[in-house]
Image (cartoon, rainbow, N blue to C red):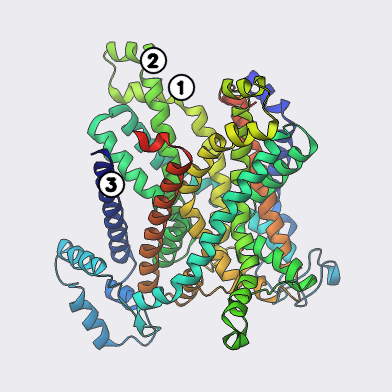
Amino acid sequence: MKDIIRTFLRRPAGIVGLVLLGLVCLMAVVAPLVYPASPWEMTGIPFSRPGENGMLLGADTLGRDIASGIVHGARVSILIGLASTLTALCIGVLLGCISGYAGGAVDAVIVRFTEIFQTIPSFVLAILLVAILTPSIGTIILAIGLVSWPPLSRLTRAQVRTVAQREFVQAARCQGQSTLSVVVRHVLPNAISPIIVAGSLTVAAAILIEAGLSFMGLGDPNYMSWGYMIGSGRTVIRQAWWMSVFPGLAILLTVVAINLVGEALNDALNPRISRA
Amino acid sequence: MPIISSLLAKLTGIILTILVIATINFVLVHSAPGDPALVIAGQSGDTDVKFIEQVRTEYGLDQPYLVQLGTYLGKVVRFDLGYSYRQRRAVSDLILDRLGPTLLLTLTAFFLSLIGGVFFGAFAGLRHGKWSDLAISLVSLLLYATPVFWLGLMLVLIFSVQLEWLPAFGYANIRAASYSTFGYAMDVARHLILPAVTLSAIYMAVYTRLMRSSLIEISHEDHVRTARAKGLTEGRILRGHMLRNAAVPVVTFAGLQAGALIGGAVVVETVFSWPGLGRLTFDAVTARDYPVLLGLFLVMSVMVIAVNLLTDLLHRLIDPRVGAH
């Protein structure tokens, strides 16, 4: 564990990512303290420029504070990113384990199924799911989870297949341990590190999908989100650049941070696979 | 006959995929809160009782689920994608009308990102460790994390609002109908630049990273060292021994990205008011026009399958080993 942390910290990019991500998480945590009013509340004069009327990043078309929206939006992005990745991990790891460990016809069917899901345009399916099930935090998480699992399933399958061949797994099987116990206690722990890395990158992708959904008007109407802010500022971009620029920068920085952390994690957890 | 059997396998795969997608549509309609007939009718405010009844009998909604699924699949096979009650037109007509602009945009972006990615990736890979490599890597890292619709807005801000070089939205000028054929094509091309660059930029970033690492890997291989030992110039080594090999994983990956590309087209067309399937998706989302959304999902999935076949072909062209076995 110590070695892993040391390798992680040796990469400056990883530290930059971790610091950025820490800032975003801090923003999410302190949002209600810094901006106690709801980000939907019209607190200022519409179209205030950044710095005007006591608004650090300006106001939107209805006089809502952009800075407040960004701070509160961090909560939604982080929450949806993590929860939908967890959903995707549950589906992907489960299917990947079954497919990789069972082999044979079961494997063939699951692989085919995964391939089909990988062909489907995932963002369009997410749009369809959220639109039909009506937009809410729950349906957004479900939709993003449902479209994000195929790469995780493929990776888990490949990992499980290699680990299952190893002697200690065969030894456990010879001892008469149940399949479930062999998979959960011996195979998965030794197959998990690349899956963790892929999972961290899935969080970044999920945040981008969430932004796209709320940009299309499919966000939860009760929560301020960055994608929604860009979407509502889109039509007035000629007059008011700040309404779209700042939320976009927030998404960009968050996703870069997660990707940097994911890559550093990759180097730390999979020293042999990592690129030179 | 390996070719025929592989073709057959491919065809079965395609049919299977389309069936699965149609089934997803069917399940979605039935898992929606409320009456499936209302979903099919597009939940229009002025719910016409007669129309709802008509939908109910047409889709056999009083029949068992399996019969209903059969009816629905039968309709899909005949390219009957339902009727948009809001736009008062058949969904298939709406989609066919918008197909051209989307194909133009996505195919341009597809090739632009492939060519750009291979070029920049090779450039960075050859200058491994130098500042130009670092700059390209940094830019691709940032682009990879950029929401595509936001990138589009930023390009509009720079190239349309500030510099006034390129049109910010639309497919052609209002007066374009009076132009000559060449003038019209040039006008559309001018309108195409920003959306195509926006849509391709992110994939270009992905392919650049991939091409770069693949080229660096290949530069250490024996056959490249042999070529260098023979005294070939660096340019010939690159063209004759490295580029093709390094581009193989890029093309494979590009095929996998086809679905994401079409998803990206949805938001890019929304930003630029590009009159394609993406814009139609946005309008259908806004109006909660479910039959159009369901039809779009099906057609876009078929487009992804087509792009997959295209990359398969490209793959065979640049890597003869693929067709051999």
Give the structural element (helix, strand or loop) at label 1: helix
Q: Which quarter of the rendered picture does the N terminus of chain A lie within? A: top right
The answer for which chain carries disc 2 is: A
Residue A117 pos. (x, y %):
37, 49
The answer for which chain carries disc 3 is: B
Q: Is residue B50 left or right of residue B165?
A: left
In front: mark 3 or mark 1?
3
Give the structural element (helix, strand or loop) at label 2: loop
Q: Which residue is drawn at 53% across and 44% down?
A: A202
Identify residue type, mark 2. Arg
Q: Residues within 10 Å of mark 3 (few under 14, many from 20)?
A: few
Q: Is residue B260 above or below residue A231?
A: above
Which residue corresponds to mark 2?
A166
Residue A101 pos. (x, y %):
32, 27
Identify residue type, mark 1. Asn
Q: Residues within 10 Å of mark 1 (few under 14, many from 20)?
A: some
Which residue corresponds to mark 3?
B7
CB contact under 8 Å: marks 1 and 2 = yes
- Residue A190, which numbered label? 1
Residue A22 pos. (x, y %):
70, 42
Identify residue type, mark 3. Leu
Question: How far apart are the two marked residues, 3 and 1, measured between alpha carbons?
Answer: 39 Å
Q: Considering depth in this image, is B186 or A123 the residue closer to the camera?
A: B186
